[in-house]
Image: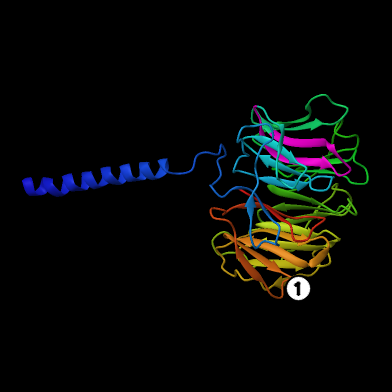
Amino acid sequence: MKFLLIPIVLGFLLLLFAAIGLSGGLGGLNTSSPGRGGSGGGIWVSEDDGRTFELRGAIEGGDNATMSREITGLIPGSENESLFAVSPRQGVFRTNNRGESWQHIFAGDVEATVVAVNPNDDSEVYVGAILNRKARIYKKSNSLEDWTEIYVDAVNRTEFVGLHVDRNNPDIVLGLLSNGTLIKSFNGGRDWVLASRVPASATGLYVDVRNPDNIYVSSLESVFKSTNGGFDFEQMNLNIRGNAFVGTQVSSLTTNPNNSAEVYVGSLGEMSRTSNRGETWESINILTPSANVPVQKIALNSQNTNRIYYVAGSVLYTSQNRGESWKTRELPPGVSTVSQILVDAQNNDILYIAAQ
């Protein structure tokens, strides 16, 4: 009987020590930042085309206060060096010095999901957020003293995954919900109309800044296009092999900033490009052909669209020749999930990475 008890006791002690070890390991993690993301999240800025990165998250007016390490959105503002960042836990931030310091412009008992700004006026900002399980849109401008709720959705457990303000007519605003519903306003958000419903769970909204009638909506499995301002959509035929276990997976999408007919789609271990809005596709010979590694984000340089960037795993890939060859650079330690890549509109060597 004693011989039987010995292995039982030893097993119990091993389990106890393992539990203590795990607890100690968790306690040793960096918990100084309030976000839920990993230690490598936040806004990272490179001034040498991705060779080195610096974390920039200092909040103005706070003693050593920093932004959350969980950044789910990053967009350029209307002014040089201005950016807007979204943190679900903290709200929305703005910088006018390329991230050297940030202003906390939107906060409260809400979960921010997306932000959009008038392309001609940084003071007019729209935020998609969740409050009491309902998706809402808030707006602030020079004519409003504080943030005003301008839309609330009737369906619980949806969220805004895209907002867009028309460059030529800022009174035109688009909002895309995660259930595929696209709403549109023609008077700066005072009134809304149902534009259409995409028959899929939506993940992103992409509008041609030169011709806002051309709109793309991405889902987990496909991409839909509209040529009449979002009132009708058709599903694009994608050149994606798919995976035997999960099927077709759209992990990223972007358009050529100078030619919206050119669309890039990333998926599990592959990237495809169309130059005619999906009529035909070509595969791009990327360096991560593994079907288990998604192409997280794709970006093009607006001043030289031969320069392409994408992230897979914890590596940044850069091409100077439209994807014929690539350079690789490891992202900062801890960065594993990238929510956005931005190339500075004024300086081609400045690159922004938003990470969770």
- The x, y position of residue 134, in whole percent, is 68, 31
Q: Secondary structure at mark 1?
A: loop
**Residue 266 seen in render:** yes
Residue displayed at 76% across by 67% down: 307
Crowd rating for badge 1 (residues with CA inside 10 Å; few <14, some 14–19, many 20+): few
Q: Is residue 27 magenta?
A: no
For residue 86, what is the image quadrant?
top right
Residue 346 horizontal/vertical position (percent)? 82, 56
Q: Is residue 27 above or below residue 217?
A: above
Q: Is residue 168 left or right of residue 101?
A: right
Residue at 57%, 53% (x, y): give it. Answer: 335
Which of 208/105 is in front?
105
Extreme residue in the left direction = 1
Residue 177 image position (x, y, % from top left)? 73, 41
- Does the segment drawn in magenta span residue 126? yes
**Residue at the image position 64 percent from the left and 67 percent from the top:** 270
- Residue farthest to the bottom, as pictured: 324
Q: Is residue 2 above or below residue 348?
A: above
Which residue appears farthest toward the front when viewing the image? 63
Per the rendered image, the range of residues in magenta is 109-129
Q: Is residue 149 above or below residue 40?
A: above
Where does the N terminus fall, quadrant-wise?
top left
| Residue type, mark 1 in image | Asn
Is 104 displayed left or right of 226 in the figure?
left
In the image, 239 versus 14, the foreground residue is 14
Q: How far across and how far down the image is residue 38, in percent? A: 54, 47
Instruction: Please identify the dominant SS of the magenta region.
Output: strand
Q: Is residue 248 visible?
A: no
Q: What residue is disc 1 on?
A: 321
